[in-house]
Image (spheres, helix red, strand yellow):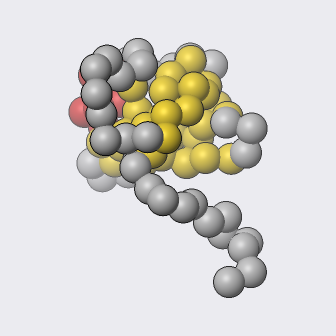
Amino acid sequence: MSLATQPPGGLTSVLNILRTNVKKIGKNVGYSVDIELDAGRPLLATITRKSLSNLNLQPGQSIYALIKAIRMVHENANL
């Protein structure tokens, strides 16, 4: 998953683009940080600390989650 502060411009192979809000920013652990998104259902993105700094993400901020996947499964799904 990629995060963006603006909708992507032009053509992209990413077909799943969700407008969402930053719900919570986790603690920096090593080079990465978890970002909890409020997308109607819990959604968790892991990005680098550099990306967090570049995007200047803050709780409550409106952002775009770009998901390049055919399917996402909830951790409690019965498979």
**Residue 63 appears in the figure:** yes
Left or right of 31 on screen, residue 20: right
Residue extending farthest front: 11
Left or right of 38 on screen, residue 5: left
Residue shown at the point (58%, 41%) measured from the top left: 36
**Towards the viewer: 5 or 54:** 5
Query: x, y (%) of residue 25?
Result: 53, 35
Residue shown at the point (72%, 73%) measured from the top left: 77
- Image vertical order of residue 74 relative to residue 58, above or below: below
**Residue 34 appears in the figure:** no
Quadrant in which residue 53 is drawn: top left
- Image vertical order of residue 19 relative to residue 13, above or below: above
Left or right of 47 on screen, residue 42: right
Quadrant in which residue 48 is drawn: top left
- Dividing the image into 4 quarters, which one contains the C terminus? bottom right
Query: x, y (%) of residue 3?
Result: 41, 33
**Towards the viewer: 4 or 30:** 4
Query: x, y (%) of residue 63?
Result: 50, 22
Residue shown at the point (37%, 41%) measured from the top left: 14
Query: x, y (%) of residue 47?
Result: 36, 43
Q: How many marks?
A: 0
